[in-house]
Image (spheres, rainbow, N blue to C red):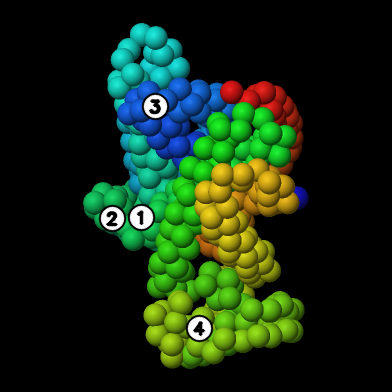
């Protein structure tokens, strides 16, 4: 493999591993803040136990998320130096704000929350975890605005220095802040993180309920998480719909790959069962077609036009199969999780909820689904953007470092893989250990 391919693999591995921890942090911080707030309002010790128990699991996840996030930033200088030189003035701004504002805010107040149980009032302690929750989500906002700019660059111009080198300079910071692509991406990503947290709490609660451990505690945990999860699933669907419309406007090649549309046409049907044949640039199977639905979802016009992949040069098309199948499987998982959440809300309201052992077992084994769906979403976002690292501005092949060697990348790739493999083992062990113990 060449340096470009290895560097792409390295960033993909580190990025996807980091995103195992991020979504749980986004949602679980809000649930813990809610639990503690209910304790402050009611003086019910069960709510306090819930805040402490789920807070312990949150801290394990939070610490590992920080470690895995730091290593990603090194790669901008190590593997993607040309990218950093070309767009660093723009991309670096939201990252700097995230680090100096959101990250420090959550880091300070998580310390207050961890060490302040007996040192500050109950109300101030609850406020501290709410600040952590807000700061965590604010951190995601800046990161996703930066990524949204890469997907749909706005508020910049290109300049050439005396040496003839071209780079991008920001001329309108407000344009980045209100970039529709970035804001919709933030809403979609954050709400998917809430689904991860909901199914995390539901799954662990289901495990204990099947074994009849701490029934009041885990019934209440499951009930709150199922309601939170249902709201989050619905928001994911709504924001995903808006996201698809934005993609149709700004990245027509990605949309065509997501739906495997080869010929430009109007009134495009949505095939529920479809198999793309990339070699022959067609779909070998397209069954159960819903007339005009793809056009309506993409451009809000049942007779709207969707540009086909054949209208773009092959070198400017994204890899169709990973984009198409990642999108399809992600949507199917989202529908299944919505159904599980609906059943969870309905059944958890019954007094003898623990009798539904089959359902609880399904919930337990569904715990990984939102994690997988989130990873598939990032495959759609990043693979579907290729061959561009900044869509329409800078190709991925032009962004890789010129001075790095294959041996160096292989060494760092192996190092990161081993490091993250070890962290994965530690994370699974700690979460399993403390989640099995119960409150």
Tell me what residue is drawn at x 46 percent, y 60 percent: 234
Looking at the rendered image, the disc whose residue lies closer to the viewer, 3 or 4, is 3
How far across and how far down the image is residue 202, in percent? 59, 43
Dot 3: what SS?
helix
Is there a contact, CB below 8 Å, between mark 2 and mark 1?
yes
> Residue 224: x percent and y percent?
48, 42
Circle 1 or circle 4, nearest the eye: 4
In front of the other: label 1 or label 3?
Answer: 3
Distance, label 2 to label 1, CA atoms, is 7 Å
Q: Quadrant of the C terminus?
A: top right
Residue at 40% of width from left, 53% of height from top?
187
Could you say which is closer to the camera, residue 371 or residue 253?
A: 371
> What residue is rendered at 39% in x and 27% in y?
39
Q: Nearer the viewer, residue 247 or 199?
A: 199
**SS class, disc 1:** helix
| Residue to which mark 3 is pinned | 39
User: In terms of secondary structure, where does tag 4 sit?
Assistant: helix
Graded by Cα atoms within 10 Å as few (under 14), some (14 to 19) or many (20 or more), the crowding at tag 3 reads many
Q: Which residue is mark 1?
A: 183
From this view, report whether residue 394 is shown above or below residue 281. above
Question: Label 2, label 4: how many angstroms apart (C-alpha)?
Answer: 29 Å
Spatial distance from mark 1 to mark 3, Cα to Cα? 34 Å
Q: Residues within 10 Å of mark 2 (few under 14, many from 20)?
A: few
For mark 4, what is the residue?
Answer: 293
Q: Which residue is mark 2?
A: 178
């Amino acid at each position: 493999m060449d340096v470009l391919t290895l560097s792409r693999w390295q960033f993909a591995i580190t990025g996807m591993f980091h995103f195992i921890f991020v979504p749980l942090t986004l949602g679980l911080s809000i649930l813990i803040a809610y639990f503690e707030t209910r304790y402050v309002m009611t003086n019910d010790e069960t709510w306090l136990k819930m805040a402490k128990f789920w807070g312990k699991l949150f801290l394990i996840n939070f610490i590992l998320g920080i470690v895995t996030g730091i290593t990603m930033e090194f790669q901008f200088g190590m593997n993607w130096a040309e990218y950093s030189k070309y767009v660093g003035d723009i991309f670096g701004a939201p990252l700097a704000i995230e680090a100096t504002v959101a990250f420090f805010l959550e880091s300070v107040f998580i310390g207050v929350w961890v060490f302040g149980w007996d040192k500050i009032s109950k109300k101030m302690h609850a406020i501290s975890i709410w600040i952590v929750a807000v700061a965590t989500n604010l951190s995601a906002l800046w990161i996703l605005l930066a990524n949204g700019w890469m997907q749909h660059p706005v508020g910049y111009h290109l300049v050439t220095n005396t040496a003839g080198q071209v780079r991008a300079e920001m001329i309108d910071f407000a344009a980045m802040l209100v970039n529709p692509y970035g804001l919709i991406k933030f809403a979609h990503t954050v709400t998917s993180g809430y689904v991860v947290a909901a199914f995390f709490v539901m799954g662990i609660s289901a495990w204990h309920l099947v074994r009849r451990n701490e029934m009041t505690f885990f019934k209440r945990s499951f009930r709150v998480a199922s309601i939170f999860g249902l709201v989050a699933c619905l928001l994911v669907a709504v924001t995903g719909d808006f996201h698809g419309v934005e993609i149709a406007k700004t990245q027509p090649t990605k949309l065509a790959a997501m739906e495997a549309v080869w010929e430009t046409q109007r009134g495009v049907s949505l095939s529920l069962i479809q198999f793309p044949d990339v070699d022959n640039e067609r779909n070998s199977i397209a069954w159960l077609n819903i007339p005009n639905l793809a056009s309506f979802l993409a451009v809000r016009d049942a007779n709207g036009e969707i540009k086909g992949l054949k209208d773009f040069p092959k070198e400017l098309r994204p890899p169709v199969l990973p984009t198409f199948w990642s999108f399809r499987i992600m949507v199917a998982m989202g529908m299944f999780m919505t159904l599980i959440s609906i059943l969870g809300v309905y059944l958890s309201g019954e007094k003898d909820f623990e009798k539904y052992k089959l359902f609880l077992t399904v919930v337990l084994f569904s715990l990984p689904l939102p994690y997988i769906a989130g990873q598939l979403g990032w495959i759609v976002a990043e693979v579907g953007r290729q061959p561009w690292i900044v869509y329409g501005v800078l190709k991925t092949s032009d962004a890789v470092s010129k001075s790095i060697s294959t041996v160096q990348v292989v060494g760092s790739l192996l190092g990161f893989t081993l490091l993250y493999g070890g962290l994965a083992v530690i994370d699974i062990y700690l979460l399993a250990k403390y989640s099995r113990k119960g409150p």
